[in-house]
Structures are given as C-alpha cells and as structure tokens.
Image: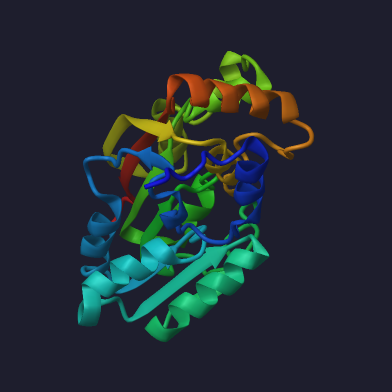
Amino acid sequence: MTPHPTPTYDALLAEGLSVPTEGWDFSWFEGRATEARPSWGYAVSQAERLGRAAAALDVQTGGGEVLDFALGRVGARAPRLVVATEGWPPNVAKATALLRPRGVAVVAAPEDAPLPFADAAFDLVTSRHPVAPNWAEIARVLQPGGTYFAQHVGPRSVFELVEHFLGPLPEEQSSARHPDRERAAAEAAGLEVVDLRAERLRMEFHDIAAVVHFLRKVVWMVPDFTVEAYDAQLRSLHARIESEGPFVAHSTRHLFDARKPGR
C-alpha cells in the first residue's frame, strides 16, 4: 500500500485558514491537537447547578455549546428562566439557533458593557472562559444568596505558543488572570468566594494547520493574527513540528464558585 504523502506547509496553511471559527466547537482539532481537561468537569458541574436554579444567566456563552450540553443533562429540571449573553455577532446567531429550541433567550451584549438585566434577576450566573468578568455587574444581577459558578482562563495560558509569535511578554500581562487577583476583585464587588481551584493542563499541536485555526479562533492569544504578518514564525514552528514532533504548551484554568451574601 502506497503511503499518503505528507501535506506541504502551504496545504496545511490553507486548511487551517479554511475552517469556520464560529462557536466553541473544537471537534475539528481531533487528531490534530489535544488539551487535557480540568478534573472538575465544568459542563457536568454546571448542569448540576442548573438543576437547582430557578432563574439562570450564562454570560459570554460563545456559540452556546456548553450551555446546550448542560441543559441537555438537566432535562425537565431546567430553570424556568434561562438567558444567555454573547457579544460577537456570528456567535450570537449560532447560539440563538442552538439554544432557542431549549427556550433560552440569547441577548446580544458587548462583553465590556453593563448586563442588560434588572438587579437581583438571577439566582445563578454561569460563564465558561469569560474574557474579563465584570464583577460589579455579576453581583448586581445576582439575588441575595445567589451563586456565580464559572471556569476561567488562568495566567500564562498557552504562553509557550503566544511567546513564539510575540516574544517574551511583560510579567504584568502574564499575571492579569491570576486567580488570587480575580478573587480579590470578586470580594471587592461584595461576593464571597466559596471555592477556587486551579490547574495547569498539557496541550499538543500536531501540525501547523491546528496552530493557524487555533489562533484564528481564540483571537485574543495573538491579537491581529494573520499568516502574512507572522509568516516567519509559522514557518519556523512548522519546521520544528516536522523535526521534533508535537509542539507542547500548557493551558491554565480555574474554577470559581462565589456567592452573593444574603438569604
């Protein structure tokens, strides 16, 4: 049997550029990149919280995939009211199509704007990988006794890859998402942090197509990324993967469980 030829750099580049980036479905990466998952299993844990809530808000829902999975597990025990926000128009459309059959209203809301809801409207606020939690707004829309339950991206996440393209970054930038800093911000907004857990997780990129698609999808990693602007870095990384095997990086995640004091 004749072996399949190894794809060329240009072919891999074209493939990485051709894949749609909407939503948070990462199934295309199967066989091309891997990422270990946090031990707490966020989506399953989110489902457990939804099963005990009456009114829930999912902030920065992306394409709605995680919330859809969680609600699918909850079934008939779903809250009577579930709302989601999202700021990127392609994701708003995708989340609306996915979540509308579950009775979820998706509200287009910029991630840096106040939440368009009344005070104390929800007893549960969730979020998976918010860009920057607006702690004052989260506290405002939570009922007394309500819970914020979320998985955040931690400090220096995938920085091995980021610094390959951007060079060494200042310490201030690398520590901006530190869980201790976020704990202090949550407490300053009046929330009590019940649980905060952090993990560092191995990632592997098996070809340059996976790298290109990842950087197009997770746009804040290398801002204004284009293959033209970073041609030299892409070529050197491709050569490195070809000669040494998968490029290894590490993501960081932390689990937030916070409560608004009250009844």
- Residue 146 shown left or right of residue 76 in the figure: right
79 relative to 202, above or below: below
Q: Is residue 160 visible?
A: no
Q: Nearest the camera: 259 or 107?
A: 107
Q: Nearest the camera: 234 or 175?
A: 234
Place of residue 47 in the rendered image (x, y in percent of width and height, measured from the top left): 25, 64
Which of the image's four quarters has the C terminus?
bottom left
Count of labels in the image: 0
Q: Residue at x 22, y 44 (%)?
A: 40
Q: Nearest the camera: 168 or 178?
A: 168
148 relative to 224, above or below: below
- Residue 229 shown left or right of residue 262 in the figure: right
Q: Residue at x 40, y 74 (%)?
A: 82
- Residue 9 shown left or right of residue 242 in the figure: right
Q: Is residue 225 visible?
A: yes
Q: Among all residues in the image, which is located at the extreme right? A: 228
102 relative to 121, above or below: below
Place of residue 8 in the rendered image (x, y in percent of width and height, measured from the top left): 61, 38
Colour mapping used in the image: rainbow
Q: Residue at x 30, y 66 (%)?
A: 70
Give residue 186's quadrant in the image: top left
Place of residue 66 in the rendered image (x, y in percent of width and height, measured from the top left): 38, 61
Q: Residue at x 66, y 66 (%)?
A: 89
150 relative to 158, above or below: below
- Residue 19 shown left or right of residue 138 in the figure: right
Place of residue 224 in the rendered image (x, y in percent of width and height, measured from the top left): 74, 39
Q: Nearest the camera: 32 or 82?
A: 32
Give residue 67's quadrant in the image: bottom left
